[in-house]
Amino acid sequence: MKVLRPQPYRDRIARGLSVLLALLLFGTLPTATRAAPAGDTVTILQGADIVTMEPYYSNSLPDQNAIIHVFETLTRFDQNIKLVPHLAESWRLRDAKTWEFRLRPGRQFQNGEPLNAEAVRYTLMRGKRFFEQRLGDVAYQYSLMDLDTVEVVDEYTVRIRSKSPAPIMPYHMAHSQTAPMPPRATEAMSVQELQRRPIGSGPYRVAEYVPNERVVLERWDQHPSRPAIRRILWRPVPEPATRLAELAAGNADIILNVPPDLTAQVERGGQARVEALPGMRRIIFGLRQDRHPALRDVRVRQALNFAFDCPTMMRTLLANRGECTGTLANVPDQNPNVKPFGYDQRRAAQLLDEAGWRMGPGNVRVRDGRPLQMGFDCPQGRYIRDAEMCQLLVADMAKVGVRLDLQLFDWSVFVQRSARRGAGFRDMYLIGSGPGFDCQSDLALVQKDSGSNRSLFESARFEQVWDDLSVTFDNKKRQEHCYRLQEINREEAPVIFIWFQTDIYGVRNRLNWKPRADERVRLIEATLR
């Protein structure tokens, strides 16, 4: 098993190990080494680095958590994941393909440019150009939007027209890749400047960006919301034990992805608390349909699902904080009749035999002289127990004669391999996908044209129902289509289903903040005690 990581991680790992060793030996950090955050600064430790601050180059949550403080969208999801107005004060459907949005007047960008209908038109048409020219990482969002034209009606009114009926266009306007950008400044800035010091209309702006080390956001005092927190410091710390040690030492205010079996350590000492809730992030093992020929056989894909001992993983790695799943749709769109595969080695072996993969020398299955062995790519530190999940899968697959070559990657390396529909992945991979906030967006994870379909799965049955769902406005019919799509997914097994992540945070008691089911770490309404 290989671990690939960028050079800057070595110093951070060494520092983290020294912090952990001090805690183990002394129960706390020596005062001289303690570097508590300033009183008006909130420090957040994520398992992965912020790779870019430019929305058009990112679909990664660690990036998005910072981006949503710098950029604003026409609509947004509130704390209860309900769609509400934001930069747009209202919107209406003019016809099946045309939506009209009315902006709040008098808003501006951080460089003084007006935030008006022309800025919205510029931003969306820029995204359309990126999509058509295969620039950045916008394929997921703009393929779903199917954007045609954007018309400026007056200074604060804009009409957005799609090529096909667009029942969920207001949902798309809550995505950071539709957040208005200042036209003049954006055109004048280089790609590197946009990725490190972008200009938005949000209540924070980028004060410092040091790759693999930190991103510092400072409050923009001309924003009407004027948040209570003056500075936000983001740091990547891949190792869960190191994040816990930093929280205990007073060097962090929020740590993400606390392993369920380590939650008791958060509250030890009385300075921090656990905040946990069922999340909306789908964790899957992806199966590339364009790599090993075995993965194009539905019997093999089903067999891999039966061979994966998800219940044992839930018990041993995740303290049963959640359930195994057989769907990709979030609540409330989940079909209650779609169940997990369950662990059944005998059924897995039977399906592999039927597909012509017979057990050969060294307990590895073979067909036509080719062994059933595949490359397997896995991030380390991005998701809860991600590396351990991958190691368990390797062991489970070996029991039925499938050999996996596992490589672990730090997130800044892994996310580059996942770009362009996973062009850098080998045969299999572990990845998490955040919510689309609607069944259609959720199931785009396996739709043939979607930028998030990194397995390159394609099913005629699925596409026929998908086409009906995509143009349907009636909510009852949309639910029927959504349920049918989940049944097809369960039958055709485009991925190995795992679970919807339970989100667990460690939070210092001095911070008034509650997590959200969509995993967005939003501090605009947070306060310090």
Image (tube, rainbow, N blue to C red):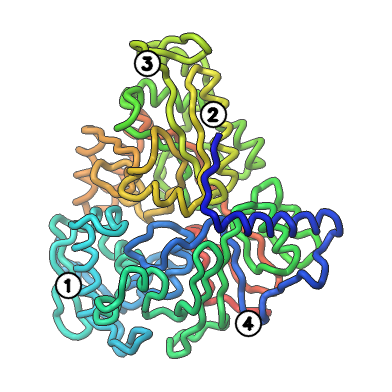
For the residue pair 265 and 87, the one nearer the viewer reads as 265
Taking the spot 45% from the left edge, 79% from the top edge, the residue there is 205
Q: Amino acid at mark 3?
A: Arg
Q: Pick whichever of labels 4 and 2 is earlier in the sequence.
A: 4
Residue at disc 1, secondary structure:
strand
> Mark 4 — residue?
40
- Above or below, 259 relative to 303: below
The percent coordinates of residue 338 (x first, y second) are 42, 34
> Mark 1 — residue?
159
Q: Pick whichever of labels 2 and 1 is earlier in the sequence.
A: 1
The percent coordinates of residue 61 (x first, y second) are 46, 58
Q: Alpha-carbon neighbours of circle 4 within 10 Å: few (<14), some, or many (≥20)?
A: few
Q: Amino acid at mark 1?
A: Arg
Residue 504 visible in rendering: no
Taking the spot 62% from the left edge, 31% from the top edge, the residue there is 312
Q: Pick whichever of labels 3 and 1 is earlier in the sequence.
A: 1
Q: Pick whichever of labels 4 and 3 is earlier in the sequence.
A: 4
Residue at disc 3, secondary structure:
strand
Taking the spot 49% from the left edge, 41% from the top edge, the residue there is 378
The extreme front residue here reads 7
Between the residue at mark 2 and the residue at mark 3, the CA separation in whole angstroms equals: 19 Å
Q: Amino acid at mark 2?
A: Val
Image quadrant occupied by the C terminus: bottom right
> Mark 2 — residue?
394
Between the residue at mark 2 and the residue at mark 1, the CA separation in whole angstroms equals: 51 Å
Q: Amino acid at mark 4?
A: Asp
Q: Pick whichever of labels 2 and 3 is earlier in the sequence.
A: 3
For the residue pair 188 and 23, the one nearer the viewer reads as 188
Residue 336 falls in which quadrant of the image? Answer: top left
Disc on res. 370: 3
Q: Nearer the viewer, mark 4 or mark 1?
A: 4
For the residue pair 161 and 199, the one nearer the viewer reads as 199
